[in-house]
Image: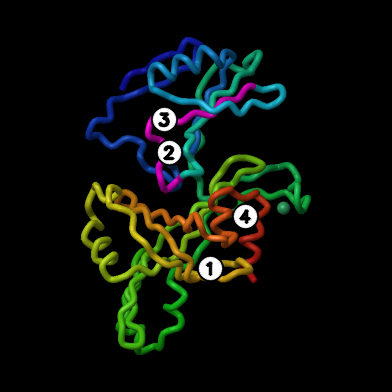
Amino acid sequence: MAHFQDPTGAAFSAWQAGSHPGIELVDEPGAPLWMDLMTTDLDVAQRFYAAVFGLSYTDASSAGMRYSMFSVPGGARPAEPHRPRQGAIRAFRRAPCPAGWRIVAMVPVISGSNRPCAVCRRVHHDLTRVLGTSAPDDWLAVSEGERMEAELTPDVCILPCHGTTRHFIRGHIQLPVVEPDPDVFVWSVWTEVDEASMECIARSWSDPNRAATAPLSGWLATELPYEQPTRGLQLTIYTRDPGMAPLLMVSAGSKHPLAGEQRDGIALHRVAEFAELLAR
Ligand SMILES: [Zn+2]
């Protein structure tokens, strides 16, 4: 580990990760979610971090503030097309304090905003980040006898059903929260997979390299509070490192509102609405 100071005065540390675990953890409480550099000289900072870390930038300046979002090389992962950016550099004409980095960590709630909501005028804060079910919907539909033969863990469900065996795994559908502040909401849902996919998942379950598994296909097995049914929606399953639920992507071609929300993001108001719809 070494400590450095960039030419605008902000301190940062770096280390050669090698085989030593770094900060690869994402979407779990405590993991870094977003990084911000506050500085007075955007151009100098951009050139410095591009030369040292290979950052690339997207300008997102608004009236009165220069704001530049950055991505690390290879940072845009196929499962997270809406989250290709890891942070931003924001420029102040005069710094409110010495130039510095700020790291935003994932917490189990979305802290929200103290400003009244643009839709309902209420103030939404401390909303639950992850909502979902602890079993596939069909778990409740089978008979007591069949359930005796079944297996349910927090991540996997094997369900004998009318003479066949059905296979389910739990995963995350991430919806980017795009206003008023960037964040992420997660539907924790179940997806049905065929037997071959289940065998593949079981084989690589403890493999430290399992995130390299080719994406699999599945069908959403959880009814979510949308006007159109969500069960049966085609999903692509991206396996992640051990300990992390796979990421689920609704097919890009789907006309279902859930696909649109996953692609374009939602407002904070919608997160409050989800909690209310589920409580009914
Ligand atoms: Zn609202």
Count the labels in the image.
Answer: 4
**CB under 8 Å between callouts 2 and 3?**
no
Callout 1: helix, strand or loop? loop
Q: CA distance from mark 4 to mark 3?
A: 29 Å
Q: CA distance from mark 1 to mark 2?
A: 27 Å
Q: Which residue is mark 1?
A: 230
**Residue bounds of the magenta highlight:** 66-80
Q: Nearer the viewer, residue 231 or 242?
A: 231
Q: Which residue is mark 3?
A: 72
Q: Amino acid at mark 3?
A: Val
Of marks 4 and 3, which one's residue comes earlier in the chain?
3
Q: Mark 4 against mark 3, which lies toward the viewer?
A: 3
Q: Residues within 10 Å of mark 1 (few under 14, many from 20)?
A: some
Q: CA distance from mark 4 to mark 2?
A: 25 Å
Of marks 1 and 2, which one's residue comes earlier in the chain?
2
Of marks 4 and 2, which one's residue comes earlier in the chain?
2
Q: Amino acid at mark 1?
A: Thr
Q: CA distance from mark 2 to mark 3?
A: 8 Å
Give residue 34's position: percent from left, percent from top.
50, 35
Callout 2: helix, strand or loop? loop
Q: Nearer the viewer, residue 145 or 3?
A: 145
Q: Amino acid at mark 2?
A: Ala
Q: Quadrant of the C terminus?
A: bottom right
Q: Which residue is mark 4?
A: 271
Q: Which residue is mark 2?
A: 76
Q: Tell me: 267 left or right of 222.
A: right
Q: Amino acid at mark 4?
A: Val
Q: Tell me: 91 left or right of 141.
A: right
**CB under 8 Å between callouts 4 and 3?**
no
